[in-house]
Amino acid sequence: MEQPQKEIQFVSLGPGNPELITVKGLKALQDASYIYCPATLSSNGIRSSHASNTLQALGIGNDKIRTFTLPMNKNREAALKAYNDLADEIEVCYKSNQHISVAAEGDAGFYASIQYLYELLKNKGLQVKRIAGVPAFIAAGPVAGIHLVKQEERLLVVPGTITAEELTEKIHSGYVVVIMKLPLCGEAIIEVMDKNPDAEFHYFENISRDNEFYTTDIDIIKERKLPYFSLMIISPKQ
């Protein structure tokens, strides 16, 4: 009797520490024939992948791991073509009864660029399923020893495209604000810190990784070169 085709699993790896993956996510990776994960290409052509490093730390063999890179520019045509080509490749593997997983850092459904791939595969009529994970801002709370929101507080998660004016308005409205993609709004953050001395600014880099960094010192934050894996939690002064 023919076995039913398994779903393509989009597995959330968590913020970086291999121990923060869920048991369900790990099992999906272990059962996979191939695991696709994103990589970056440096200016001198060296490929690196935090996701691949996490997979290897979890005991996943290199023979299972297939990395893919995406053009990083404002012209989305090249990136969309890369996603379409990848979707076609995964479709071939899927239809040959391979068990496919796609790995994503953080949570695969939260500011995750691979959502484009998820939709492409779904539109092809393939079975896809997403396994939840720990996003970086949730993992950041224990690092700072803070209760992210409590009682009647409201949480707002925004990308780094937010302006200083918008951010100040949200702080004055009593929101606890999480800013993802922090390098996009470095100047706005400095302006907001200067104009809102009564707020608490919790700054994080590389949550759960070996090079994790955390501070609330505004002077230090102003001097940091904000890396890709940085975020901020802003809360009204208690």
Image (spheres, grey):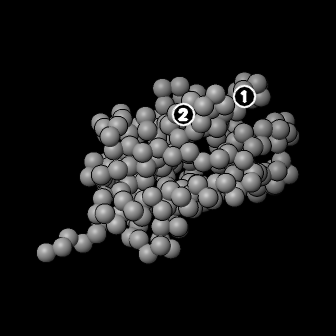
Q: Is residue 132 above or below residue 179?
A: below
In front: 108, or 177? 108
Seen at 70% across and 42% down, the residue is 182
Numbered tag placed on residue 225 in the rendering: 1
Answer few, some or many: residues within 10 Å of disc 1's Cα (few below 14, many 20 plus, some between 14 and 19): few
Nearest to the eye among marks 1 and 2: give it: 2
Quadrant of the rendered image containing residue 6: bottom left
Q: Amino acid at mark 1?
A: Lys
In front: 90, or 204? 90
Numbered tag placed on residue 47 in the rendering: 2
Numbered tag placed on residue 156 in the rendering: none
The CA span between labels 1 and 2 is: 23 Å
In front: 156, or 127? 127
Q: Quadrant of the N terminus?
A: bottom left
Seen at 69% across and 58% down, the residue is 77
Seen at 46% across and 47% down, the residue is 37
Q: Is residue 10 left or right of residue 78?
A: left
Seen at 83% across and 38% down, the residue is 187
Answer few, some or many: residues within 10 Å of disc 2's Cα (few below 14, many 20 plus, some between 14 and 19): few
Q: Position of residue 142 (x, y in %)?
A: 49, 38
Residue 50 appears in the picture as rendered = yes
Q: Amino acid at mark 2?
A: Arg
Q: Earlier in the sequence, mark 1 or mark 2?
A: 2
Residue 155 appears in the picture as rendered = no
Q: Position of residue 148 (x, y in %)?
A: 56, 47
Q: Position of residue 21 (x, y in %)?
A: 38, 45
Q: Position of residue 2 (x, y in %)?
A: 18, 73
Q: Is residue 111 left or right of residue 86?
A: right
